[in-house]
Image (cartoon, rainbow, N blue to C red):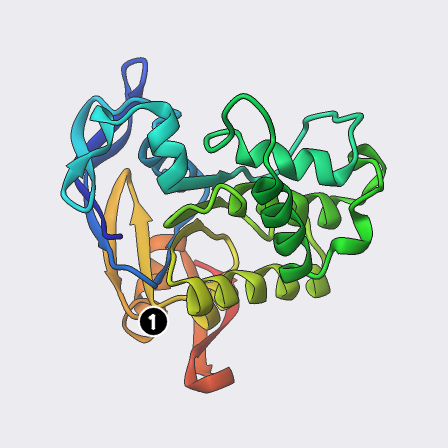
Amino acid sequence: MKLSVKELSFGYGNANALEDISLDVDEGTIVSLVGPNGAGKSTLIKCIDRILKPRKGTVFLDGKQAAMLTSRDLSKMMGYVPQSTHEVFTYTVFDVVLMGRRPHIGWRVSANDVKIVAKTLRFLGIERFASRYFDELSGGEKQKIAMARAIVQEPEILLLDEPTSSLDIRHQLEVMNIVKRLVLQRRISVVMAMHDLNLASRFSDKVVMLKDRGIYTMGNPASVLTPANIENVYGVRSEVRNGHMDRPYVMPIEPI
């Protein structure tokens, strides 16, 4: 499924947060939104998922306007994972993940719904948590459960808002490897807001760099993550070297 955003703008009160954003996300690709705090990364994710209503512009899913879809139909196409979950669930992990099947469930939970949840927990390597209570888990474990809940929706597009924030290095890599496997094995598309430029570089097909409420530049990681772009957008001098799998590796030096 192709996602297209055309001339999207959004504001809080009289203040503009996004202006004339246009981008395309092809099937089976990972697109990272990067930029300084306040650039509009999370806001754009929420506009795409209809959590926020744009002032103008259109989001298309395979040429169909997302605004014309029912919430149920949209949930079957797109899954959203917030930056962190503050929800307090006194339910088991299995039951929390099963909530993600809500767009597909009729009057009762089917054997197929249970099968999909069990399969997803195995896919993510977290089946051992199935009978534990959600509120007993660590932050990294909860992030994986939140991803599992979105995945069981069987979306064709996955929206991730800072999926590695507050996670240690091990959990960051585990989460990002899960994202990569989903794209490779299920051909879904991923749009994620990212702070870590090196994780964005390593795992993305396209990087969209935001500045001053708009798109500063976008393209493959090598064309976007350059010392000049980083200096102009972040106000930081940096060196960019050839890193893992020939992806650019950013080494910040000092603010300017």
**Residue at 33 percent of width and 75 percent of height:** 222
Q: What's under tag 1, amino acid-wise?
A: Thr
Relative height, residue 68 to residue 21 (above, below): above
**Residue at 37 percent of width and 50 percent of height:** 156
Q: Indicate the quadrant where residue 20 lies.
A: top left
**Residue at 28 percent of width and 60 percent of height:** 27
Residue that lies at the very extreme toward the front in this rendered image: 111
Q: Can I make out residue 39 in this image?
A: no
Q: Indicate the quadrant where residue 66 lies.
A: top left
Q: In which quadrant of the rendered image does the C terminus lie?
A: bottom left
Between residue 81 and residue 119, name the one nearer to us: 119
Whether residue 192 sits left or right of residue 131 in the image: it is left
Identify the secondary structure beneath mark 1.
loop
- In the picture of the structure, the residue carrying the numbered disc 1 is 226
**Residue 199: x, y in percent?**
52, 65
**Residue 38: x, y in percent?**
42, 37
**CA neighbours of label 1 inside 10 A, class few (<14), some (14 to 19), many (20+):** some
Relative height, residue 244 to residue 174 (above, below): below
Whether residue 10 sits left or right of residue 168 in the image: it is left
Figure label count: 1
Q: Can I make out residue 193 in this image?
A: yes
**Residue 69: x, y in percent?**
26, 27
**Residue 155: x, y in percent?**
41, 46
Whether residue 157 sits left or right of residue 84 in the image: it is left
**Residue at 56 percent of width and 40 percent of height:** 83
Between residue 84 and residue 59, name the one nearer to us: 59
Residue that lies at the very extreme toward the top in this rendered image: 13
Between residue 72 and residue 65, name the one nearer to us: 72
